[in-house]
Amino acid sequence: MYAIVEIAGQQFKVAKDQKVFVHRLAGEEGDKVSFDKVLLAADGDNVTLGAPAIDGAQVGAKITRHLKGDKVIVFKKKRRKGYRVKNGHRQSLTEIVIESIVTSGAKKAAPKKETKPAAKKEAAPKKAAPKKSAPKGDDLKKVEGIGPKIAELFNNAGINTFTDLAGTDVDKLKEILVAAGSRYASKNPGSWPKQAKMAADGKWDELKEWQDNHKGGIEN
């Protein structure tokens, strides 16, 4: 017969006449002690489980001696700090001998049946209607003379693609720039629709050659 019992915060598998070393217990050598936190008891094929402890079960023991465990070295070091500390520790222990394992009055814990409350039918969340994504525009900054801010001004005015820009009158572009302030009013958009037409038609090599020959996108 054996039992699993909790002694001084630790769990042990014990049997009669077995010697066990536990954390230091209060009491003198020769004193009788008992432990009632028996988590499991087994006698052959008859196994009794606690929930968590077995009601009425008890393990009796006798204190044979108090002693200290083997020394444990605790060494602390900090690199490049010149810090080194060495300490030793010996755990205070008590040796006990198991004299009896009593399970009288023990009740076998029946497995608890968990009754789950009837799940309420919840209305399925409505799927959000897919957002209509705005038509993807072109990178107007590929037109020589148009920077990020001017591209943003044109986008806000509804000019999002190379085709839009190519079809916009130069005077209209100038009007957008003047309305944005003096910083942009001095820009010359004369060649921008022409460049945008080449980009819209996919004539990138021709556009690059034209830009190489016209610094800043300004035609002489």
Image: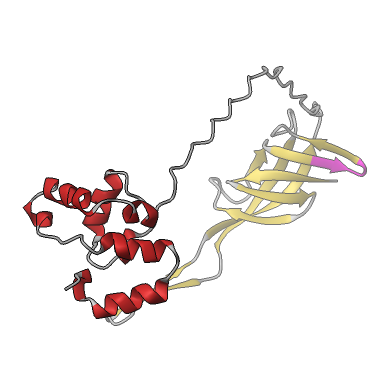
Along the horizontal axis of the image, is 220 left or right of 93? Answer: left
Residue 103 lies in what quarter of the image? top right
Q: Position of residue 220 (x, y in %)?
A: 16, 73
| Extreme residue in the right direction | 45
Majority SS type along the magenta span: strand
Q: Which image quarter: residue 198?
A: bottom left
Pick the front one: 148 or 44: 148
Residue 20 drawn at (x, y percent): 68, 55
Q: Which residues are magenta?
A: 41-45
- Is residue 25 depicted above or below 50 in this figure? below
Instruction: Residue at 51% x, 61% y: name it.
Output: 91
**Which residue is pictured at 74% across the width and 24% down the height?**
114
| Residue 8 higher or lower than 118, as above or below | below
Q: Residue furthest left?
A: 182
Q: In the image, 196: left or right of 147?
A: right
Residue at the location (86% across, 39% down)?
A: 47
Vertically, is 166 above or below 145?
Answer: above
**Image side of residue 161 versus residue 36, left or right:** left
Q: Left or right? Give the position of 162 relative to 12.
A: left
Q: State yes or no: residue 209 in magenta.
A: no
Q: Is residue 84 visible?
A: no
Residue 30 position, x and y percent, is 64, 49
Visible residue check, residue 145: yes
Q: How many numbered marks appear?
A: 0
Image coordinates for residue 61, horizontal then vertical, percent: 70, 45
Residue 43 lies in the magenta-colored region? yes
Q: In the image, what residue occupies the spot 74% across and 49% down?
A: 98
Most foreground residue, 109 or 152 = 152
Where is 100 relative to 147, above or below? above
